[in-house]
Amino acid sequence: MKVDSCKNCNAQDISISFNPKRASNRFFSGTIIFNKETLTIKKIQLAITDPKIKNFTSISNDDSVTPKSVKININFNPIDYKKIQSIDFELTMYYKSTKSFEIISSNSFLYFYDYNKPFEEPYFTDNIAFKNDYDKIMALQSSDDFWNSNYQFPKSFKEEKAINYFKNNGYLINYNNNIPAIYLNLIKPSILTWKKDRLLDWKNIKVSLNKSDKRNSINQRDPSGELKGDKVFYSYGDMKRYMTNQKGKEQFKFSYVLDSYLKKGEIQFVTQTLFNRATSFYPYNRTQNKLIYIGVIFDIYEVFNRELKDQLKNITNFNDAKVACNTKFKEATTLVNKMKLDTELGLNSRKLKRWSERIKLKLNNFSE
């Protein structure tokens, strides 16, 4: 550690720099701006080259990501230096694919302003075991209203252009949009949110495993024999053992998620209908009828979710909103069970078609 000259500091401030005793990719170097009169830290700057980061991989197995540098600036609030006001984060990485090599710099800026203000965590009508943070973020897709209400600084032209580009050509996590089916094999989300025509293809129900994963997946299977929705059968024997353990049963897990935010001082509620692929299972009969059958279940839950959205307009606290959410979910489940019984679990094509037309008509009567 050493004291450095500080050109942009006040007379009471000093700059203290520090470095690891040995060159290492495990420890940061940095600088602290310190007020010697009030004994407070005003700013911390951290940097590291070739950082040793675990579990930092590309989505595609054929690509590689190598972090090259990390820079972090922590700025404390000048009104109260015990509080952090903002954090700047810069990550530079090498991205290598079979077709190209890119040096990518990613910048993030976190600004803290609602100190000590409690908020309600999102509520799910069914427990969901998310695989990672991205998995959960995708389940909590928020509307533009949410971002506009909670964004403290006007978006620059560059930001607006980038957001519009991804909205038109790709997707943005946590924005209210549709993840293209082509990405599902890469992302493998545990859940899918309801979208119109979401279940037109089996790719949106299941995620194919790589051939190299086949042996491990069989060996690591849960002893109970339950087969998850994002797994596949590998042989007739696999399928027979599954059917014996489950006695031919199926399970499609759905849920509502309830979230809230403030807009001009008034509480606003956001709800989504979710299909939990990770805990769903079914006999191996990937027919068009079965696909329609799952879609009808999804649509029934969405019909009641639309009714819930209208009901929430007259509710002003989160607890009452949770009660309404649970009530609507139970009502939806009752109708789903009635449909299952009437269509013989989707085997009766004539009745299934009638249910499908009836539910789609109900959906068309609502505005998204």
Image (cartoon, grey):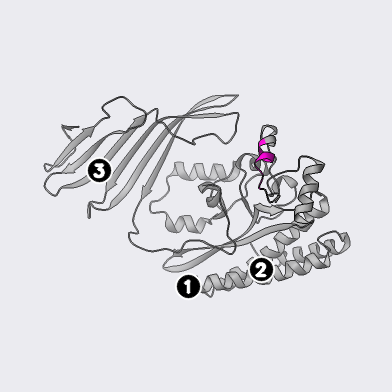
* Left or right for 83, reference 52: left
- Quadrant of the image occupied by residue 257: bottom right
Q: Callout 1: 10 Å neighbours few (<14), some, many (20+)? A: some
Report, in whole angstroms, how far the alpha carbon at label 1 lies from the one at label 2: 20 Å
Looking at the image, residue 66 lies above or below residue 85: above
Q: Amino acid at mark 3?
A: Lys
The local secondary structure at tag 3 comes to strand
- What is the x, y in percent for residue 219? 67, 39
Decide: marks 1, 3 in contact (CB < 8 A)? Answer: no
SS class, disc 2: helix
Q: Is residue 92 visible?
A: yes
Location of the C terminus (image quadrant)? bottom right
> Which residue corresponds to mark 3?
43
| In the rendered image, the vertical position of residue 263 relative to residue 104, given as above or below | below
Q: Residue furthest front?
A: 223
Is residue 307 at all visible to an observer of this figure?
no
Residue 88: give x, y in percent of width and height: 35, 42
SS for callout 1 = loop
- The quadrant holding residue 324 is bottom right
Q: What is the distance, in whole Å, between disc 1 and disc 3 at their CAs? A: 39 Å
Amino acid type at image mark 2: Phe
Q: Amino acid at mark 1?
A: Asn
Tag 2 residue: 304
Identify residue for label 1: 317
Q: In front: 15, or 54? A: 54
Q: Earlier in the sequence, mark 1 or mark 3?
A: 3
Q: Quadrant of the N terminus?
A: top left
| Percent coordinates x, y for residue 286 in the rendering | 80, 48
Q: Residues within 10 Å of mark 2 (few under 14, many from 20)?
A: many
Q: Is residue 144 left or right of residue 47?
A: right
Q: Which residues are magenta?
A: 216-222
